[in-house]
């Protein structure tokens, strides 16, 4: 159990520990090792889930290509530096030093999978999750459930997983980091939830969340199961000032290039959306409540003349208090 202890033989184990030694090991564990930080949570726990990784269902595991540097091993007891996606563990792995886990953590009624990780001999990232489309400046909660698979009193000098979490931009710039600490051994299989908050950056909406195991050595232990990795939005998205873009000109001359006026939108909702196009005399010549619609430069089936036209887009904001937002501009019709 000691933080600094190391053992080089992977499957060496012990079923009983003399009482004085056990007292020393327990004291070393509590006084020499920092206790984990369990949770930073959304004030509003009912926010939308952006990511909900449950690792699939029994017989239908998800692919983790590009999400881990560990080697996939399609067996119940993956070796050092390997992982498996399993629905249960029978308790016989490595001379029965691992817990018997009859099901994953996901809610009852779903025969799901968990990610089973056998730690490698070097510290580093063992799982990462890309996330995109976040609301800039909005807070999010990252959470996951983890279990130390090594049963208590099975190994002398057991290796204990020691985790931290990093939230980075896709370019590697740090947004948030948190040292979780050691995932303790237990007498019975025990899932523990850990979470951290971060604020989505304003310069990009693409991030990567990395789980790091700071424990790195070959020996008995450093094995865990992971499940229900989630990213939850904590609050409403702030208004984005430029959510609609319409080109300055288009040419409906049937040459196959720029023949229709397209309305580009980044709106997260189409509630109360309306686009209206007017001629120079203020007459309405095109209207739609669907952002995917386009205008072909006609009115009542007849081509409109080359001229400058005014457009007005209205929609309802996504943040309370709900209010109507209006954008206005002009477009040149060229023939």
Image: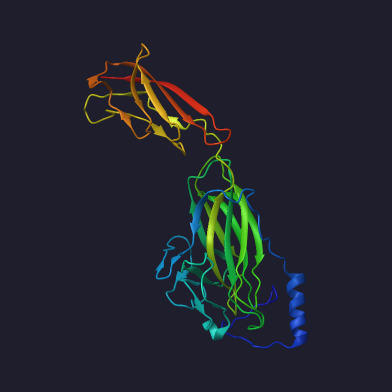
Q: Quadrant of the C terminus?
A: top left
Residue 287 picture quarter: top left
Q: Quadrant of the N terminus?
A: bottom right
Q: Can you give x and y, in whole percent of width and height, for residue 199 in the image?
A: 60, 45
Q: Can you give x and y, in whole percent of width and height, for residue 150 in the image?
A: 60, 77
- Total of numbered circles in the picture? 0
Residue 20 picture quarter: bottom right
Q: Is residue 11 left or right of residue 76?
A: right
Residue 23 picture quarter: bottom right
Is residue 123 among the parts visible in the rendering?
no
Tell me if residue 14 comes above or below residue 257 in the rendering.
below
At x 48% / y 25%, what residue is drawn? 326
* The one of 142 and 217 positioned closer to us in this rendering: 142
Q: Is residue 333 left or right of residue 233?
A: left
The residue sitting at the top extreme is 281
Q: Can you give x and y, in whole percent of width and height, for residue 290 in the image?
A: 37, 33
Q: Can you give x and y, in whole percent of width and height, for residue 171 in the image?
A: 51, 49
Tell me if residue 287 comes above or below residue 68 in the rendering.
above
Way the structure is coloured: rainbow
At x 63% / y 83%, what residue is drawn? 154
């Amino acid at each position: 159990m000691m933080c600094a202890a190391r053992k080089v033989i992977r499957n060496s184990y012990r079923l009983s520990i003399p009482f004085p030694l056990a007292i020393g090991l327990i004291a070393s564990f509590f006084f020499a090792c920092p206790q984990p930080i369990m949770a930073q949570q959304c004030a509003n726990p009912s926010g939308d889930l952006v990511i909900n990784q449950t690792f699939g269902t029994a017989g239908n595991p998800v692919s983790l290509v590009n999400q881990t540097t560990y080697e996939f091993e399609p067996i119940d007891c993956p070796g050092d530096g390997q992982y498996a996606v399993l629905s249960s563990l029978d308790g016989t792995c490595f001379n029965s030093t691992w817990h018997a886990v009859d099901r994953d953590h996901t809610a009852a009624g779903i025969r799901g999978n968990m990610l089973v990780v056998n730690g490698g001999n070097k510290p580093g990232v063992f799982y990462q999750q890309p996330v995109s489309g976040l609301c800039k400046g909005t807070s999010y909660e990252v959470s996951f459930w983890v279990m130390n698979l090594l049963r208590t009193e099975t190994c002398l000098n057991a290796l204990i997983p020691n985790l931290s979490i990093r939230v980075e931009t896709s370019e590697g710039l740090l947004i948030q980091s948190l040292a979780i600490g050691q995932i303790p051994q237990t007498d019975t299989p025990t899932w523990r939830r850990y979470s951290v908050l971060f604020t989505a950056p304003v310069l990009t909406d693409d991030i990567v969340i990395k789980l790091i195991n700071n424990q790195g050595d070959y020996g008995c232990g450093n094995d865990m199961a992971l499940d229900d990795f989630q990213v939850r939005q904590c609050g409403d998205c702030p208004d984005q000032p430029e959510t609609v873009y319409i080109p300055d000109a288009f040419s409906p001359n049937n040459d196959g290039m720029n023949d229709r006026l397209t309305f580009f939108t980044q709106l997260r909702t189409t509630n109360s959306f309306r686009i209206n196009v007017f001629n120079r005399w203020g007459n309405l010549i095109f209207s739609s409540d669907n952002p995917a619609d386009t205008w072909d430069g006609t009115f009542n089936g007849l081509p409109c003349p080359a001229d400058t036209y005014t457009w007005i887009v209205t929609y309802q904001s996504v943040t309370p208090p709900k209010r109507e937002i209006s954008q206005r501009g002009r477009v040149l019709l060229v023939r």
